Amino acid sequence: MTMRAVLAVVPVAEIDKATQWYERFFGRPADTRPMDSLAEWHLSELGVVQVFEDPNRAGRTTVNLTVDDLDATLSTLSGQNIPATDPQLVSGGRQRLALIQDPDGNQLGLIQSLT
């Protein structure tokens, strides 16, 4: 079986409110709005984050995203009033991880490789 892409789906209670928050998080508007209840950010050719209105599942998702410079990313997010945990060493010290929660409680992990 060959997988070609990843679409991470983040369920939220209210799409318009969540879209505004994710626009601040990603630093730009959604790339597409294929339907009223869905906003998509295309992070790479093979990676997409979909924010989807589903109040019954909102707040129960974890998505990890890799970044080149965790400190710079956290500084940018802080300027957008998006708090994060202090970075921790993980994976035997090969990576740094900081966690963020969206307004619904979904967890977003930001990971920087140190190798």
Image: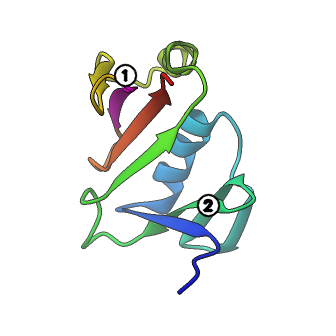
Residue 82 falls in image quadrant: top left
Q: Amino acid at mark 1?
A: Pro
Q: Mark 2: which secondary structure?
A: strand
Q: Is residue 27 above or below residue 16?
A: above
Q: Which residues are magenta?
A: 94-100
Residue under numbered circle 1:
83
- The structure residue drawn at horizontal position 58% and vertical position 81%, both measured from the top left corner, is 2
Q: Amino acid at mark 2?
A: Val
- The structure residue drawn at horizontal position 58% and vertical position 20%, both measured from the top left corner, is 69
Residue under numbered circle 2:
48
Q: Nearer the viewer, mark 2 or mark 1?
A: 2
Q: CA distance from mark 2 to mark 1?
A: 23 Å
Q: Mark 1: which secondary structure?
A: loop
- The structure residue drawn at horizontal position 73% and vertical position 64%, both measured from the top left corner, is 32
Residue 102 visible: no
Q: Please state which of residues 74 and 22 is positioned toward the viewer in this rendering.
A: 74
Q: Is residue 108 above or below residue 10?
A: above
- The structure residue drawn at horizontal position 49% and vertical position 43%, both measured from the top left corner, is 65
With 12 as the anchor, is 67 left or right in this view? right
Secondary structure mostly taken by the magenta-highlighted segment of the chain = strand
Is disc 2 surrounded by few (<14), some (14 to 19) or many (20+) residues within 10 Å?
A: some
Q: Please state which of residues 64 and 107 is positioned toward the viewer in this rendering.
A: 64
Residue 14 falls in image quadrant: bottom left
